[in-house]
Amino acid sequence: MASSSSKAATEDNESIDECFVKAIEYVNKAHQMLRSLAPVAAQQLAKISVEISMVHRQASELVETSEISTLILARALLTPAPQGSPKAETWAKVAAKGKARGAAPEEARTNASNTWAHLESHTTQAISESPASDERVVMIRGCKIGTGTSDITRHISEGPLLSISLCYDPVRPSVVAGIVFLEAEHARAFLQRNDKIAEENGHSLFGAGVIVELGPPWSMDNDLQAMVGVSGLGCERHHRICERRRLIFSGAGLFHRVDSTTFHADLAAIVGDDKIELIWLYNRGSATVVFTDTRSARAVQKKLKERALNGEWSEGVSIKFGIDPCEKALNLVTSVPEIAAVKMQ
């Protein structure tokens, strides 16, 4: 039976953890509020959150607080989980229970036990208990600093993504990617292809030391449902593309009315520049934009249609969802090569 002093120490440690978590939650809220109003300040808050996470880790080592992952805290700040998605703690199961792929078993075990093991007691849903249809999340750990979303997505061809998010892991200074596929079968196909590459080359699709693994369960939600159509009937029946993280803009003389810099700035003001993976101009009247998630694409489409009613540059412009580059590679041709690549992340 624990002594009263050890019990008090445990309670104090839990309070310390709670303080750190709450601090990052407040920074997260401020970051979201300022992202469009003051993007520079929002970026500074993102850095502050990571710094707080690192201080928390140092404090954990000094006072033996429970190890709440800095990775999870950073992810919670930079990419808040969509409604209906797993709780933040569930992402811890990626290393604690996920299948390590593209790395030596010993390396995977060491990373999992040292960085994530204590979080096992904090998770609420075991991957083994979830249906196979929910296994649509893939985590990629150990990417080099500076990795962008396109560095990840260009290796994916199995099917459309609901989202891709990146965050910094201060425990093992590197970038971690979280990918949510539309279908679990797409995630499995991607993992199987990575396994084959790792078997042949001795490392994953993303290089030596990068671990690719099955993530926590992610059940069908409204965002995923919007990607397959109403009542699961599919959008093909209506001769249109369901929601995707890509938009296609077309309108006569579009880029005579708005220059590419303003076009980019207007989109970034709606969802944040970090949510934009690619902006490519085909010609002076059409362009395609790839976002990191379908919610961002939807938000931009909605806002620009509203602005069109007020006579802004989006008036008369067709803004439709396009096929995800991860289900069919983009053919980036252009008649305006000098201005085509507005943004390539």
Image (tube, grey):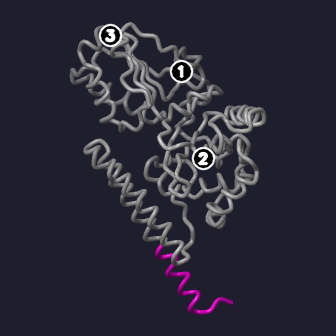
- Distance between the Cα atoms at labels 3 and 1? 21 Å
Amino acid found under the numbered disc labelled 3:
Arg
Left or right: residue 337 compared with residue 266: right
Quarter of the image where one finds residue 22:
bottom left
Q: Mark 1 points at which residue?
A: 323
Q: Which residue is drawn at 47% across and 54% down?
A: 74
* Vertical relation: 213 (above or below) 245: below
Q: Nearer the viewer, mark 2 or mark 1?
A: 2
Q: Earlier in the sequence, mark 3 or mark 1?
A: 3
Decide: is 6 above or below 240: below
Q: How far apart are marks 2 and 1 (CA)?
A: 27 Å
Is residue 235 shown left or right of residue 306? right
Counting residues from the start of the chain, the first of labels 2 and 1 encountered is 2
Judge whether residue 83 is colored magenta.
no
Q: Is 126 rendered above or below residue 59?
A: above
Q: Name the residue under label 2.
A: 141
Position of residue 20 measured from the top left corner of the image (x, y, whole percent):
44, 67
- Please name the residue that numbered disc 3 is placed on: 284
Q: Is residue 337 above or below residue 85?
A: above
Q: What element carries label 3?
A: loop
The magenta segment is 1-16
Question: Residue 307 vs residue 326: left or right?
Answer: left
Which amino acid type is marked by label 1? Ile
Q: In which quarter of the image is the N terminus?
A: bottom right
User: Furthest residue to the left?
Assistant: 311
Is residue 9 magenta-colored?
yes
Q: Nearer the viewer, residue 181 or 311?
A: 181
